[in-house]
Amino acid sequence: MIWRKSEEEVDVLVQRVVKDITNAFKRNPNIDEIGVIPCPEARYNRSPIVLVENKLGVESWCVKFLLPYVHNKLLLYRQRKHWLEREALADITCTLLLLNPDFTTAWNVRKELLQCGVLNPEKDLYLGKLALTKFPKSPETWIHRRWVLQQILRQFSAVGRSRKPQQGEAEQADAERSHQLSDNLARTLHQEMKVCSDAACRYPSNYNAWSHRIWVLQHMAKGNVKVFHDELSSMRLWVSMHVSDHSGFHYRQFLLKELITELSQTPASTTTPSSPQHRCSTVPSSSPLHHSHSQANGEVSEAEPAAEEERQLGVTTVLQLFHQEMELCSDLIQSFPGHETLWSHRRHVFYLWHHWRREQQQQQHCSNGENKSVPLNSNGDPGLPKVSAQSCAGRGESVNGQRYATEAMEVDGASLPDPRDSKRLKRGVLLPSPPALPSEHSFVSGMLDSCCNPEQRRFALAYKKWLDTVIGQQP
């Protein structure tokens, strides 16, 4: 039996296994999952490394020899008691991290190999992705991924700073390189979203995965309205299938806050890069909001009207986001009774709406500059614009019970408003009714009258009490 072999024979065996793992990655660079195959002893004279299609398996009997071997080898190297070639060091750390990804020393060694150019960042991201298929909550793996992504972002920043004004062919080549770098960064962002989603599906309430996903958006897509909106839309199906996963709903709350912050900013000028049109890649370059016309004396003639249209467009989009999120909460609460996560999410969304509406009222009072009453629309909220039926039809919204086909690109049936409709915001039908205390009380009453689930009733009563004691007491 294997465990009766001498120490030298075990060393030879383990070295062969490490080599087999390295060769497996060379034979198939598209391995997408790892695992341990239950096998208490070696029954055949064959390698314990099994490669089937894109799945890599390690027979369990050899793990008790393999893991201590690579662990001791790495510690001896760090203590400068044993020398290892860089290639051998990369292979040993790879094997060790696939079996135990929370071994910090191994990740630190790979950081050194990355900094000296032995490894490239994409290879380490790939290794971390494989480790997460077996250990989706591994904190050290997520920490190392963020470190690698920071190195990639520094490379992009360094290339951007090193570019100098060019002319002719050199300028065209520089533009092509810049475009290629942007594509690589977008591809990396998409891959990270996929890794986070897979890890969240493998481990319920995977706080480490969702925190990493938030970090990625904050550092790689800050201010990009389209990316945040697409994330919010694509997550609808996921949270509908994981109604008890609080981390997923917390991620939606983060997306909502970021979108509201970006869309509620009042631009100082229509040409400032911080305006929503510049932050959203879906706005066509021919949009009139991208142009400002100067008078002969240097004054901007159309800046203020364009800025007001842009502000109204942002407010309109925020109203749609709140309406869609509250509708999602209502549907899920009715379809899946007795889940506290859904009621907690509804509470957070309504609280966010309540404070955003108060801020809009204060801004309206400040912008008036006089002691005049703020005009109210039929919804009873100040400064909330109207949208024409044609505008709603262009976005695939419901008008008078009719569903119109949409022309803009949609993600799960939701899309950003067309900026070209901003001139029609002041006339036509109203937006869907925003959340309000009476409508929330009606929703709770309906739940109490129709529900048979004792947990659902308890959560509904707690939500009603929160509405009365927290929201109802505020001006």
Image: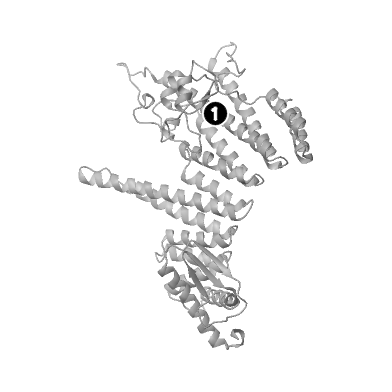
In front here: 50 or 105? Answer: 50
In-image side of 406 versus 370 (left or right): left
- For this view, does 470 lie left or right of residue 225? right
The quarter of the rendered structure image containing the N terminus is bottom right
Location of residue 267 in the rendering, given as x and y in whole percent from the top left corner? 46, 27
| Relative image position of residue 226 (x, y in whole percent) | 46, 37
Q: Compared with residue 106, is residue 353 higher up or lower down, i.e. above or below?
A: above
Residue 24, horizontal then vertical, whole percent:
45, 71
Disc 1, SS: helix
Q: As drawn, which residue projects farthest toward the front? A: 402
- Image quadrant occupied by the C terminus: top right
Extreme residue toward the left, this view? 168
Residue 408 makes an appearance in the image: yes
Residue 304, visible in the rendered structure: no
Please name whichever residue, 132 or 362, is drawn nearer the observer in this view of the structure.
132
Q: How many numbered tags mark residues here?
A: 1
x and y percent of residue 320 in the render? 54, 28
> Quick check: 72 left or right of 467?
left
| Residue at 61%, 25% in the rendered image | 434
> Given the image, on which type of amino acid does mark 1 rest?
Gln
Identify the residue at image location x=75%, y=32%: 450
Residue that badge 1 annotates: 320
| Left or right: residue 122 compared with residue 128 | left
Q: Residue at x 32, y 17 (%)?
A: 295
- Quick one: which residue is furthest to the top in this view? 372
